[in-house]
Image (tube, rainbow, N blue to C red):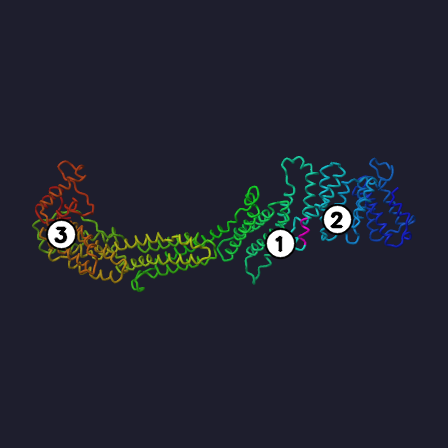
Amino acid sequence: MVLPLEFLQQFKASDFPDLQEHEAWQGRNLKLIEAGLLVHPFVPLNKSDSSAQRLKQIIRGAYDRPLETGKNSESMQVLRTAVMSLAGRSHDGTSDGCHWADGFPLNLHLYQMLVEACFDSDDSTVVDEIDEVIELLKKTWVILGINQMLHNLCFAWALFNHFVMSGQVDIELLSAAENQLVEVAKDAKTTKDPNYCKVLSSTLSSIMGWTEKRLLAYHETFNTSNIESMQGIVSIGVTAAKVLVEDISHEYRRRRKEETDVARSRIETYVRSSLRTAFAQRMEEADSKRSSRNPTPVMSILAKDIGDLAIKEKNLYSPILKTWHPLASGVAVATLHSCYGSELKQFIAGLTELTPETVQVLKSADKLEKDLVNIAVEDSVDSDDGGKSLIREMPPYEAENAIANLVKVWIKERVDRLKGWVDRNLKQETWSPGANRDNFAPSSVEMLRIIGETLDAFFELPIPMHPALLPDLTAGLDRSLQLYVSKAKSGCGSRSSFMPELPPLTRCEVGSKLLFKKKEKPQNPQHRGPQNGATNGTDPLGLPQLCVRLNTLQYIRSELENLEKKIKTCLRNVESAQADITNGLEFKFELCQAACQEGIQHLCETTAYKVTFFDLGHILWDTLYIGDIASSRVDLLLRELDPILETISGTVHIKVRNRAITALMKATFDGFLLVILAGGPLRAFTRQDSQIIEGDFRSLRDLFLADGDGLPEELVDKASSQVKNVLPLLRTESEGLIERFKRLIADSDQSRTASRGKLPMPTTTGHWSPNDANTVLRVLCYRHEEAATRFLKKTYGLPKKL
């Protein structure tokens, strides 16, 4: 007999005081039938069982439209057929009775319905007479096979279910469910009854499923208005998880030695899942916030929102979650750090140039990272490893490195652009004097203007590391300036390119008329060939142009100090610099400084030797001391030098003027000495000529002294010392020169390698001195005396003519 079915057949609606009571009674009986035959059947149901499907339809229909009960009711006949078909099934296929309420599952279901008496039907609160109701319930335990553990489980579920059904606002219900679940957890450790464990697993899985749905996205579930319920819900969820894992899971028992912290693991899962969900929502919101009125980059908006989210997490949620996980805040910010880092990595990968938006994003990322790391560090002060494991989860964004790399690209582009400008403009530079008041190249002014603008642009970059990247910029600008200086002096030749090739040694033709009449100039003098050959017979640059080049290098050198002052001033004004840092920094344009120093020296020498040996070469080689010494003195050379000195004095900057004139003086003295010692066979000197030559040299010195308005006397004396040391040889007797020569040869290393009885030819060193054998030999070569000629012929077989 199926009792609920019999009850439905025996009583009609007219047997009840009102229709509502009849419907409620009918519903309870139908639920009982459903529990015994469909929910907890004696024999498991097949999905294809038509009787089960028909019974489900009848019961569902009855909920919408109550059945007409009574023996003769057609609807009851249909219900009976479906019920008896299911109740008559057995495991062996024989029909040995009705199986509709066979044991534990249904008994527990019935008890669960009885437990509902503990709650007010209107507002789901626990009734005031709860203790009396519980005592009544206990009296059914013997009949239904219920014990304390099953009661605890049923009551915990009822409390939890009523909390959920009440809209999750009754904190007393939640607290009671939390406390009751603690008792269930204690019970779970004391029994391994399979039926109990099965119901326990099913019940806790349902509870855990509901809690996790909310806790895996707790930022959506909880806010300041309902945050007080979070503690209880987390507690219930964690307790359910611990029981399921520690007391029911076979896998856990096998791995128990690992001491798995279920609570900590669940909290970490909740935190990471919730923060990832919240991050995704903030990303969508950041996209919508950007507009024409708010041009802030999306990644900057997101960084600020994530920073706010981290603060909210720390202040609102973490204090609750720390009950089960002491590093809840740290786990949260590590998760946010990872999420934002993934987006930032993609952002950085797509960067090609430095823009204000890019810098803004990277600065925002840097600030966010520092805020997140600070929270993680604060949260893990008391942890076992000091938070090292969390910090390892937060690899640096390296936003500053990304900015630095972009700035370096920016620097390289501008330095390369400046180098290209130098190449183009110096090809067009004419180096003409008079382009400006100080006679330096306009291109140098323009180049320094570009450098100044580049520095201004650099310090206007909204970056936090100007001092760190400034050396890269100054080094690039220094190389560009060095390139300019190098090109400014290139193509001008050098001292050696204007020095003449010395003619072969000859001896004088004694008795000729050479000394008493001026010979005609040779068509192609030996001494003109080297100068012409060195410059391909053309004058590549005039004196005024060389002076402008010289001034330009001096101007650049003087402006370097101003550039350095500008850099220090700008550095003090940028937000990223600190006074104690900038005071210790030195930004010197060392390459350019050295290039200017060397370039000025080079141009002074080049100008001097070009003027002396190229511009005035026709006087030195074709006029001075050719033929009659008295009529071919130094006067013409002095007259030609005078306007050259005026040009230099009027054009060259005062700070390098003396250096240029000093270089010209040295070159002139060298030329004067070369005429005497290597002037070729058209020149010959007697001892008496030495007085004229010494007088000429005094006049040459006086030109540079300029009656006290020229170079300092000690400087002139130092430059003329070589000539002064050699001139006494011109008045020395030939025999004395020959003896001196032999003694010098004997004392030299060359004598050891010479053939026996023969004097070796001394090497030409160019260092003219009375103690240099080659110098003494040259004086003998130009001595117009029989003794000197005879010695040269006998010793070396020197010819009289080339």
Q: How far across and down, in percent of the image, does residue 218 sit?
A: 65, 50
Q: Can residue 524 be seen in this view?
A: no
As helix, strand or loop, the secondary structure at mark 1 comes to helix
On residue 161, the disc is: 2
Task: State how far apart marks 2 and 3 are (Cα).
Answer: 129 Å
Give neighbour class at mark 1: few <14, some 14-19, many 20+ (Cα, 10 Å): few
* Kind of residue indicated by mark 2: Asn
On residue 281, the disc is: 1
As helix, strand or loop, the secondary structure at mark 2 comes to helix
Horizontal side of residue 801 vs 193, given as left or right: left
Give neighbour class at mark 2: few <14, some 14-19, many 20+ (Cα, 10 Å): some
Horizontal side of residue 686 vs 379, given as left or right: left
Does label 2 or label 3 sit earlier along the sequence? 2
Q: Which of 770 and 276 is in front in this view?
A: 276
* Kind of residue indicated by mark 3: Arg
Q: How far across and down, in percent of the image, does residue 595 sit?
A: 32, 53
Q: Are marks 2 and 3 in contact (CB under 8 Å)?
A: no
Indicate which label's residue lies in the foreground, 3 or 1.
1
What residue does disc 3 label? 683
Q: Are marks 3 and 1 in contact (CB under 8 Å)?
A: no
Task: State how far apart marks 1 and 2 are (Cα).
Answer: 30 Å
Residue 229 among magenta residues: yes
Q: Going by the picture, which residue comes out furthest to the right?
A: 72
Specify start and end residues of the magenta stretch as a single range: 226-231
Q: Which of 716 and 489 is in front in this view?
A: 716
Q: How far across and down, in percent of the image, does residue 642 sit?
A: 20, 61
